[in-house]
Image (cartoon, rainbow, N blue to C red):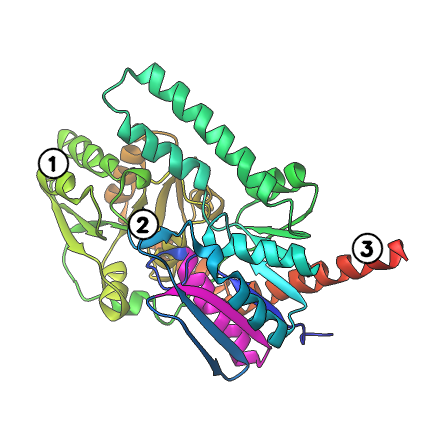
Amino acid sequence: MENQLRIAFFPDSYLEVNGAAMTSQRLVEFAKRKDFPYLCIHAARKNETWQDGSVTYMTLKRSPLSFSLDEDLAYDPFFQRYSARIERQLEAFKPDVIHITGLNDLSIVGAYLGWKYQIPILGSWHTNVHEFAAHRLAKMLRFLPDPFVKKITGFAERKIMDGAVFYYKMPKVVLAPNQELVDALGSGTNRRAQIMSRGVDTELFSPSLRTVDDDVFRIGFVGRLRAEKNVRLLADIERELIARGKTNFKFLIVGEGSERGFLEGNMKHAELTGFLDGAKLSEAYANMDLFLFPSKTDAFGNVTQEAFASGVPAIVTDLGGPKFLIDPGKTGFVARDLSDFVEYTIQLMDDREKLAEMKSNARENAMSKSWDAVFESVFDGYRLAYELREKNFKQKR
């Protein structure tokens, strides 16, 4: 079965604009390039099925009763109506392993069918849904006293995590983007848990694409401008920099979301570009001198690696997955609070020699991150899930 396992992939996010969707698309492209038999079933605007090389695509439209989870990502409580149609596609494709990516409408159907037909399941974790939901809840309850809000959101976060861990007991193998999650899922599910890192395109993102040549220190951010990304901290950092007498700097903020109005109204040295992709996004990264990522909910943080590839060191929070990408003092810093963000930023604003060294280190770090190596490890996970199922069958005979 070496590399010829037939995989049915149920990505919850595929056409949306986020790191999970981008990773899912690249995984399917990898399977096609390697000529591996692959079935990709995802939500789209209409129902279609077609073949492209070794990859079979099946797209399914969500119902009008779907509700929004984030931007263009939705949940359809009636997605199970497609179960019979998906079953027929699985019977025709004959998968050896089913790959699910999260607790959402599509993956729930994939997990159910895996259980029904006794097809081994691999599950990959892409989003910290427990932290994501807690931040959303905290924003909704801002009118209440802080201690009360923390108690409610803390309880909600724990219960959602408990539910997610229970869901991930169905797969035989679980992949997660950082060691913290690997440990939590491994111990919570009693399943084989392994790292699924992320790669970065070092040609698409490169310091050679820089177009500015002046003395302005550009501080960048790329991502959704939403509460769970903690973007209001950017305004706090700017305020502190001004208070410390810094003037020759500019924030370059790429992204859209509900917090854009707040940032526009509360920042003096900021250019908000809106959503960018392709060459314009690559140029924006390359024009940054320092990347700030205040999010506390990201499981990985693709944007940090994209900054590295562009030759830009990063400062991230000590919560979530991005901190595992940082080599402190070499490719960036891990900040505990606002004070750390400000101090590390000023350190690099004042020491351009240190900044140049860290820019070089960041680029070198990114050059070692190959998407092919990441996806080879995913296929290793498929083989492990298949072998564990076969071993279990033999033990029962």
Q: Disc 1 residue type?
A: Asn
Mark 1 or mark 2, which has the lower sequence index? 1
Give the secondary structure at mark 2.
helix
Q: In this view, does 263 lie to the left or right of 178?
A: left
Disc count in the image? 3
Q: What stretch is highlighted in magenta?
A: 20-44
What residue did someone put label 3 on?
A: 392
In the image, residue 140 sits, relative to residue 289, either above or below, namely above
Mark 2 or mark 3, which has the lower sequence index? 2
Label 3, residues with CA under 10 Å away: few <14, some 14-19, many ≥20: few
What residue did someone put label 1 on?
A: 266
Residue under the image location 24 percent in, 43 percent down: 349
- Nearest the viewer among 295 and 117 is 117
Q: Mark 1 vs mark 2: give the one in front.
A: 1
Label 2, residues with CA under 10 Å away: few <14, some 14-19, many ≥20: many
Residue 355 - label: 2
Residue 40's spot in the image, x, y percent?
Answer: 50, 69
Residue 189 - label: none
- Nearest the viewer among 42 and 109 is 109
In the image, residue 63 sits, relative to residue 92, either above or below, namely above
Decide whether the magenta segment is chiefly helix, strand or loop: helix
Residue 106's spot in the image, x, y percent?
Answer: 48, 57
Question: Is residue 111 within the magenta segment?
Answer: no
